Amino acid sequence: MLTQNNAPVYEALKKHKSNRVVQLDVPGHKGGRGNKELRDFLGADCLKVDVNSMKPLDNLCHPVSVIKDAEMLASQAFGSKHTFFIVNGTTAAVQAMIFASCKAGDKIIMPRNVHRSAINALVVCGAIPVYVNPGTNKQLGIPLGMAVEDVEKAILQNPDAKAVLINNPTYYGICSDLRRITAIAHAHNMLVLVDEAHGTHFYFGDNLPVSAMQAGADMAAVSIHKTGGSLTQSSFLLCNNDVSEGYVRQVINLTQTTSGSYLLMVSLDLARRNLSLNGKEMFRKTVEYANYARDEINKIGGYYAFGEELVNHQDIFAFDTTKLSVHTRAMGLAGVEVYDILRDDYDIQIEFGDIGNILAIVSAGDRELEIERFISALSEIKRLYGKDPSGLFDHEYINPDVVVAPQQAFYSNKKSVPIEETCGMICGEFVMCYPPGIPILAPGERITPEILDYIAYCKEKGCFMTGTEDMDLNYINIVL
């Protein structure tokens, strides 16, 4: 009888490593013997378990033994009916949810401040987005969650939509009313898909916002690597209710690698065990660190580390208190400028900086000394670099004017046009700052003066701009 103390993939790999198997299969590094520099850098033990699928270790595409057991234990831990191990990142999990729910021409209701992976899925499968514009906070300039009334209006106006996609939480820690939106969507026979890339801890912490499975959602994409402790690129796709396990696996196998990394899978297995056994204490400590840092940063002046005081039970239904989101504009610096100074001058790497805010990811793996160092650096940055905030761009989100469906626009005949000449034209590609990877422009959207001003400002402040064919973003592909 397996319990949460077990880790089936881990246990099978340990046994395999002790068997002294002759490796006449891939990978070609042969446990590190074929690439000594890689072995010395990563460690021999690491490369010895970087192996190919074989009967004792199961097969990710069609698991029947240890991976199947590990998926079952993950389902128990997360409260889902089934869990899939995803080794192509949470991008693959988000796209699998959409591919499993929608076909070409089907409508899907979603907030416009979704990650690029969701709109990329629409480009591939041909589903049509019905965007619900999120609320905005004028002081912070950030997109918020979706108000229940706005989602219900979109559902009533589009009764043929197949699904509703919800962020839980946003990058900044903002949560919508997941329970009510789920209930309304289900009452209209729509599936509920949840992007929980930043919500692993909701399943294990106390006094945190509700998780997708607790709210009764049908599917959730969960980045275990972000806040759950697994290796980068490893995630879970959780399925609930009447979602067909077999069909979802078929959909996943359309795009997920047939050479699943056992390093990623064992990290998911061990992260699940650790979360199940120690998650409450881990996230209690995380909240403690984040709350302490929030209080100390707000004493500095010029910064605003925001939190639960923002909750209005509408477009901010709840706030994720593990998120250390800090508004910087009041002391005269864009978030990306603070991000760069922290990295270049203080050797502090935070998650991201955008036009008006920074985000630091805090976990139980941090130490008090590192939290104090971050707080002290922010204080010194204010003293050395603080200035009059006038002239800074005051908002992150611009409501889109969607003219053409993403797939139609992306695959249309296009022409490369100097960016300053594109006003009024229809964009044929993505333009975004990364992170967070929320498109400023998506294929099929009209290019407006406000958007062009925003792009120019992002470039001036040093944001990492991605998505366009022209890597320097001097040209944009427009739809003919």
Image (cartoon, grey):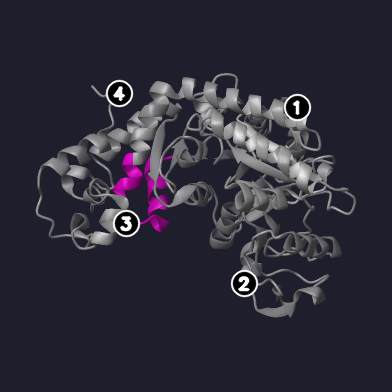
On screen, residue 464 above or below 193: below
Residue type (three-letter) at the residue carrying disc 4 = Asn
Q: Is residue 250 magenta-colored? A: yes
Residue highlighted by disc 1: 311
Between 225 and 427, the one lying in front of the other is: 225
| Horizontal side of residue 10 vs 245, given as left or right | left
Residue type (three-letter) at the residue carrying disc 3 = Thr
Q: Decide which of tag 2 and tag 1 comes sooner along the chain.
A: 1
Where residue 375 appears, x then y in whole percent? 66, 34
Q: Nearer the viewer, mark 3 or mark 4?
A: 4
Q: Which mark is residue 5?
A: 4
Q: Residue at x 73, y 79 (%)?
A: 417
Q: Please report the bounds of the magenta region as a residue range.
A: 242-266
Query: Do callouts 2 and 4 mark residues in contact (Cβ within 8 Å)?
Result: no
SS label for mark 3:
loop
Residue highlighted by disc 2: 471
Where residue 418 appears, x then y in whole percent? 75, 78
Q: Decide which of tag 1 and tag 3 comes sooner along the chain.
A: 3
Q: Which mark is residue 258?
A: 3
Q: Badge 2: how crowded within 10 Å, few (<14), some, or many (20+)?
A: few
Q: Main secondary structure of the magenta part?
A: helix
Q: Is residue 436 visible?
A: no
Q: Decide which of tag 4 and tag 1 comes sooner along the chain.
A: 4
Q: Residue at x 62, y 28 (%)?
A: 290
Residue type (three-letter) at the residue carrying disc 2 = Met
Residue type (three-letter) at the residue carrying disc 1 = Val
